[in-house]
Image: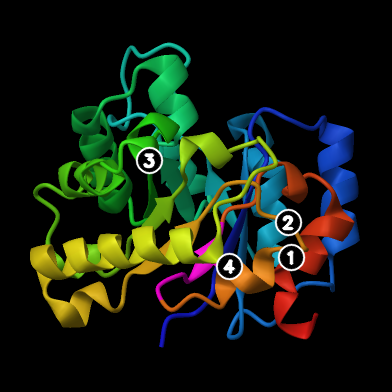
Amino acid sequence: MRTPFIVGNWKMNLTLHEVEEFLDAVKGNLPDPKDVECAIAASSIYMDVLTRFCKEETNLKAAAQNCFYKDSGAYTGEVSPMALADMGVNYVMLGHSERRKYFGETNKMINKKVKAVLANNMVPIICCDETMAKRKTYDEMNWVVNPVIEALKGISEDDAKKIVIGYEPSWAIGTGKSASGAEIQEACFLIRETLKDLYGDDIANQIRIVYGGSVNARNVSEIMSQDDVDGVLPGKSSLKAKEFIKIVNYQNN
């Protein structure tokens, strides 16, 4: 049984004061982690505040939005996975479409980051997407699994069990236009079938696959009802505590 997993991605938003207000508002309003696991992916400058809160509020996990593939060195401006682990970070998001688009991240680079995160005993959330152009040409199925295959090169079966795959069609991110439940299920099913090809049914059925792209409190229940969807990655809707609380408590809506 895969535990539902909801990760709010704050991206490059919120001030320190707003972060503190958010955390104060969600305190005591999150579901039991046995029912729904919740996390916030925050900017690295807020990791200290977030991890300290998560140690007290055990219903919430801390996620980083990115990291480098080396633990230390002359890499000005990069974030060390070893330092994140030392702070108590649980998850690291890797390969988000915005990282690929704006910062030129490649599948090879993401694979190196996945290995670095696992080596530091954190869990990678490996993001993959598709373009609207690919969907229009009915060629999206080959495209969406490629980043998954490339990101998992050299990853053992034991480590594969720990990972999370995030499916985020780029045309749905921040646009207010979410994919339909059937479209989401189709892509997530294909990702799971790919994982079965790589690791076998038993391991593939343990790996959580989450969807991101204009997720909100109104559509979360439909998305979560899909067989191969194990969670969601809300972006804009995770910036407001009230909306985030509604999303993570979708089972009670």
Q: Is residue 31 visible?
A: no
Which one is in front, 44 or 93? 93
How would you rate the neighbour count of disc 3 (Cα within 10 Å): few for under 14, some for 14-19, many for 20 or more? some
* Cβ atoms under marks 3 and 2 closer than 8 Å: no
Disc nearer the start of the sequence (3/2):
3
Which one is in front, 138 or 193? 138
Q: Residue at x 57, y 41 (%)?
A: 172
Q: Marks 3/4: CA distance?
A: 19 Å
From the viewer's perspective, tell me whether residue 76 is left or right of residue 206. Answer: right
* Cβ atoms under marks 2 and 4 closer than 8 Å: no
Where, by quadrant of the figure, is residue 28 drawn?
Answer: bottom right
Q: Marks 3/1: CA distance?
A: 28 Å
Which residue is labeled 2 in the image? 216
**Residues shaded magenta:** 228-232
Which residue is labeled 1 in the image? 247
Which one is in front, 222 or 50? 222
Residue 183: % across, % down:
45, 59
Front of the two marks 3 and 1: 3
Q: Marks 4/1: CA distance?
A: 11 Å
Which residue is labeled 4 in the image? 223
Which residue is labeled 3 in the image? 135
Determine if the magenta segment contains residue 57: no
Where, by quadrant of the figure, is residue 56 drawn?
Answer: bottom right
